[in-house]
Image (cartoon, rainbow, N blue to C red):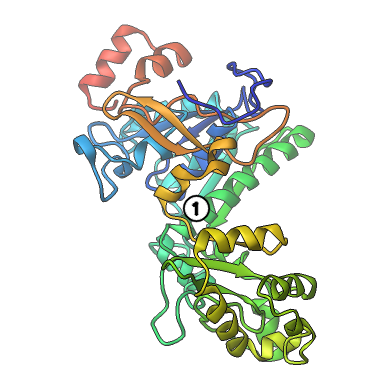
Amino acid sequence: MATTGEDSAVPDEPGTEPLAGLRVTELGTLLAGPFCGQLLGDFGAEVIKVEEPGRGDPMRQWGREKPHGKSLWWPVLARNKKSVTVNLRDPQGQDLVRQLAAKSDVLLENFRPGTLERWGLAPEQLWEINPGLVITRVTGYGQTGPYAQRAGFGSIGEAMGGIRYVTGDADRAPSRAGISLGDALAATFAALGTLVALQARHRTGRGQVVDSAIYEAVLALMESLLPEWELAGYQRERTGSVLPNIAPSNVYPTADGDLILIAANQDGVFRRLAGVMGQPGLADNERYATHGARGAYMDELDDLIAAWTATVNADELLDRLHADGVPAGRIYRAKDMFADPHFAAREAIIRLAHPEFGEVPMHGVFPRLSGTPGRVRHAGPALGEHNNDVYRGLLGLDDGEMAKLTAASVI
């Protein structure tokens, strides 16, 4: 059984989640579309994932480590979903999608623009059978514009949206964040847009297209990058572990070889840090007394702090900083998360039963809702595990129809 990570006073029963009763047909593959489906499923939506017969979503094979030959990515990304198989290139498969769309609230896809249209599944055609259908489309460049037809992966969207240029050290080429950031951002904005479109449907009764582009999702996180350039002529550059002109906010060494991040750039917080360091006069020194001054003398100040942190073991250093209200912490790896008491107390890591792995740990459902929390009901399903449930139970197909579709490799 899954540990929900929510207040035990909240009923852990089917139908209690906020999106219970919402049905999503997910046609996408890889990350940008399916992560949106995962987010909706986490809060109770019934997500019917459509996969290619015999192969399934490529994410079933992704990941560096594959115990038992199985992906460790799939149980997380496909959690809470139902898997059905459909050959989307076959007219009979396209008809199955129409039947699913007729009974769904949301159709989610992340194909290149025009793909649904070639399959006879254009929004206008789907709205003829279900006017309230929300059609969520996740792509690299969006549904319109001169680049719409280009192949668009997350890494390209990260580059175009601006985050790659400012990530890494100044003396090296732009770096990757270490996760599929662009895909996840586009999927998160797609989930937001889907919920907004569903809210609008309450007033209008009509569905609409949610157009989430990877590069625009990245651009949305770029803070004041655009006005800085046009109005101030300032080009943000890569700055490694620091924030330009904001100090102290850096990673510092400890006596036992650890690294601690300290963020004490506000005046009051810096005064507290100076006290912990045993150098209260630093807070009155004209070179460090104000936000602007500390930014101007950032390197010098960082050297002073590093010289002090290097004399204290990490645990003692953190205890002293936390006791005086100075924001600080370790840079966590997975093993640190499993050992941390705060992760444990909030059940931020949950464990699910799995037929091959026995048990799979993964992150819980965030954000936490006090009255109608989300929950993880099961790990990613086997390919086609829910064919009977969906095709017989939802669409009402009989034995003969199921046999014909199977024989024709449609499902």
Question: Is residue 91 something that shows in the picture?
Answer: yes
Q: Nearer the viewer, residue 144 or 318?
A: 318
Question: Residue at horizontal 63%, vertical 25%?
Answer: 17
Give the quarter of the figure containing the N terminus: top left
Residue 226, image quadrant = bottom right
Residue 173, image quadrant = bottom left
Label 1: how many residues lie within 10 Å, few (<14), some (14-19) or many (20+)? many
Q: Nearer the viewer, residue 249 or 178?
A: 249
Question: Residue at horizontal 78%, vertical 92%?
Answer: 286
Q: In the rendered picture of this protein, how many numbered marks are placed on residues?
A: 1
Q: Position of residue 366 (x, y in %)?
A: 60, 41
Give the quarter of the figure containing the C terminus: top left
Query: As drawn, is 98 to the left or to the right of 106?
Result: left
Q: Position of residue 60 (x, y in %)?
A: 29, 39
Q: Nearer the viewer, residue 212 or 169?
A: 169
Q: Position of residue 68 (x, y in %)?
A: 20, 35
Query: Up-down: is 265 above or below 190?
Result: below
Query: Up-down: is 286 above or below 319?
Result: below
| Residue farthest toward the top in the current orientation of the protein | 399
Question: Residue at horizontal 65%, vertical 86%?
Answer: 229
Q: Secondary structure at mark 1?
A: helix
Query: Up-down: is 348 above or below 216?
Result: above
Query: As drawn, is 232 to the left or to the right of 39?
Result: right
Q: Position of residue 215 (x, y in %)?
A: 52, 65
Amino acid at circle 1: Ala
Query: As drawn, is 304 to the left or to the right of 28?
Result: right
- Name the residue tied to disc 1: 184
Question: Is residue 82 something that shows in the picture?
Answer: no
